Image (tube, helix red, strand yellow):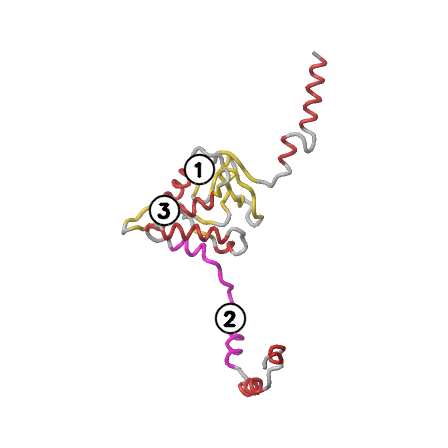
Amino acid sequence: MQKLFSTLAILMAILLAPGIGGVARASSFNPGAAGFPTVLRGDQLLFGAMAVDLFGIRAPQPGTVCRADNISFQCGDAAAQAVRRIVQDYAVSCEKVSDSQLFPMLTECHIGQSDLNRLILRAGWALVDMNVCDTYARCKTYIADQNFARDNHKGMWMGSPPASLIAATKKSETVTSPGAKAAIRNAIFNVDLAAEMKAQQEPDRTLISFLMP
């Protein structure tokens, strides 16, 4: 019996050694979550006690009203229901992709080899968040999926996506201070026309001009 306990102890030590046991190996992967999640919103999942947001897309929030053919409906609830149907009975794996938001964690999620974001966008229940899209490798693909839903009147595109969602996903413009606006305005109107005409009359000294016959 004592020999058996000694053997088990050695086996446990081997399994827990760095790079061998499952616990140690898991630490080498990027943080994330996996399993059968609860759908909180069209762009948020709950794994146990940990909520994750889907990076790069935004779905209508609970209570948001959409209209299609003069019929009003709760599109936030409809988006959540649609995502529940997508992930139903499938394991979902999510990997952290951004440190800009820690709680909930921003993740990219997959069902097998399928990108969950793409499935939601093609079903018409989310919009691409253009505030992060220009720095995201999958931006063009996501926009194509959104256009597919729009062109085929899927989900929210049976009517029009809510104005609040369109505003939230529109790329933010740089705010120009009043002083900067005044400087730009003065630069526009304080043009030295005489200097410009003189410059236009001078011969072109670029390399191209010397190569021209």
Report crowding for label 1: few under 14, some 14 to 19, many 20 or more residues within 10 A (C-alpha).
some
Q: What stretch is highlighted in magenta?
A: 163-189
Callout 3 amino acid: Cys
Callout 1 amino acid: Val
Cα distance in 3D space between marks 1 and 2: 49 Å
Say which element carries label 3: helix
The quarter in which the N terminus is drawn is top right
Residue at 68%, 24% in the rendered image: 12
Q: Identify the residue position indicated by label 1 in the image.
A: 87
Report crowding for label 3: few under 14, some 14 to 19, many 20 or more residues within 10 A (C-alpha).
many
Q: Residue 46: where, in percent of width, then height? A: 48, 38
Whether the magenta-drawn stretch holds residue 62 is answered as no
Say which element carries label 1: helix
Callout 2 amino acid: Pro
Q: Identify the residue position indicated by label 2 in the image.
A: 178
Residue at 59%, 40% in the rendered image: 31
Closer to the camera in the image, 104 or 54: 54
The quarter in which the C terminus is drawn is bottom right
Residue at 28%, 49% in the rendered image: 71
Q: Residue 8: where, in percent of width, then height? A: 68, 19
Residue at 41%, 55% in the rendered image: 166
Q: Identify the residue position indicated by label 3 in the image.
A: 75
Cα distance in 3D space between marks 1 and 3: 18 Å
